[in-house]
Amino acid sequence: MDFADFLHTHPIFDVIARQAAARSVRAYVIGGFVRDLMLKRPSKDIDIVCLGSGIELAEAVGRELKVPVTVFKNFGTAMLRTDWEPDSTAIDANRAPGWEVEFVGARKESYRAESRKPIVEDGTLEDDQNRRDFTINAMGISLNAEDFGQLIDPFDGQNDLRRKTIRTPLSPVLTFSDDPLRMMRAIRFAAQLGFDIEPDTFEAIAAMKDRLQIVSRERITDELNKIILSRQPSYGFKLLYHAGLLDFIFPELLALKGVETIEGKGHKDNFYHTLQVLDNVAERSDDLWLRWAALLHDIAKPATKRFDPKVGWTFHGHEDLGSRQVPGIFRQMKLPLNEKMRFVRKLVRLHLRPIALVKEQITDSALRRLLIEAGDDLEALMTLCRADITSKNYDRVKKHLANFDKVERKLKELDERDKLRNFQPVITGELIMETFGLKPSKEVGHIKTAVREAILEGTVANSFEAAIPYMIEEGRKLGLVPVKDPALALESLSQRGQDTSDSNL
Ligand code: CTP
């Protein structure tokens, strides 16, 4: 690859080269950008290392481009955004808007953007490359007139790219001691790029695994999410397992491992099953949270495992217990405790429901309930359920999938007919209280449930005309008499600004 030609196609490099020359400092494109350029992989940012002040160079470039520069004094770095879009075929041309360019002075000590220590000692380019994480991340391209476009690759990273190998530039013990997160990064790059980890590097990870405990959970989870988002995440998880890192970062997943046998009956290894489900989901969806749902769908199997001499191994209620474990795991992992978590919890809770529908005679009411509970997440749930079929028996898989098609067709028909998605019952607790002159009480709940059940069963339509008479009838059964015309009750509620559609089914 002719790097000089490539650099000339992007004005940012010429501007940096010109400004560096004007200040007599040497500048190089370095790290992930060079790696991704050689792999023809979209790259999100450009790192520039210079022999001198990165901040001053960034400010000069910012002035010429008339773009603002953000300075991180403590880290000795500065950042700006180009506002033109890259257009090379080697780089993702659709990525807008522009690139993030980070400038740093070459340093003697370890490269660590997150380090709180101020940068004290300037170094040579070689010093800087020595202290980077992997050979494939330590390559530089010169932006200097005398050797513009030349690749500077002291550790033969180019060959490691060709051999698909992750290897540290210096001794792995030294490189990992500088920043133990790099142990996770090694596995993350292996997973993202489909590379092997060189044996000495891998052995050092296994030996130094406990050092990961000094790294913040956020940074670990960041890497874990990148593994989960890779093309075949099981590979990354198997590396984490074999290196011994899983024990610390995700013990609940590790607990799924192993097969117990009683009276000659074994169950499947739920760790490998889960990884297979995760890969299956990954083939169908890029959604991080759907992938998390796959990882956690059977998480409560160890806690619910029982042996019954008649039926063998059972895991009754693992979907409910599992969904209850989701918030704790999210909290521990420093994952968001928002609607993403609720989505994962919901999918874990519902993951057996479509399978149960395949087995039973499908009734409209069972389908309706699933439709309502899954709401907008029905497609995601069906993706998870299809992925959950991991039998090695091809005919069985085919049969299951065909049954799923049938369930899905019926759900669609029912959805179109009843418009029940994200269903809210028209009869609310407030309306019941207003009509019968009740305070919050058991009776209110009873009537509300009765109306909701009738709507789900399909005997009453989800409309005021149909549901109000049913509500009155249910009240009568409890010996209650309306104190107000329900139409008037409805009106006064809406005047008071009451939300007449409460959502807690
Ligand atoms: N780096 C390092 N050690 C770290 C983090 C980063 O040596 N713990 C160096 C590597 O040379 C890396 C560069 O800093 O290439 C940029 O880091 P980062 O942006 O985190 O990673 P990229 O390699 O760019 O990859 P990605 O964007 O996929 O994270």
Image (cartoon, rainbow, N blue to C red):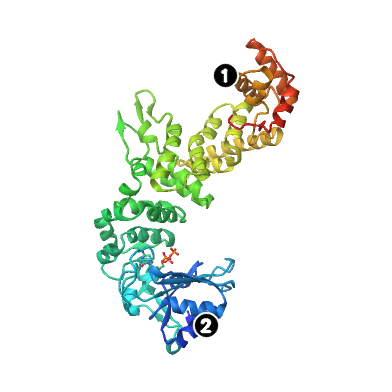
- Judged left or right of residue 122, residue 91 is right
Above or below, 38 relative to 22: above
In which image quadrant can residue 413 be found?
top right
Q: Residue at x 73, y 21 (%)?
A: 486
Type of the residue with mark 2: Asp
Indicate the position of residue 210 as horizontal and vertical percent values: 26, 53
Query: Mark 2 and mark 1: span between their CA atoms?
Result: 75 Å
Asked whether 300 or 400 is in front, the reply is 300
Decide if residue 235 is in sight here.
no
Of callouts 2 and 1, the N-terminal one: 2
Decide if residue 194 is in sight here.
yes
Q: Secondary structure at mark 2?
A: helix
Question: For mark 1, what is the residue?
Answer: 441
In which image quadrant can residue 76 be found?
bottom left
Asked whether 214 or 181 is in front, the reply is 214
Depth-wise, is mark 2 or mark 1 nearer the camera? 1
Crowding at mark 2 (Cα within 10 Å: few <14, some 14-19, many 20+): some
Question: For mark 2, what is the residue?
Answer: 14
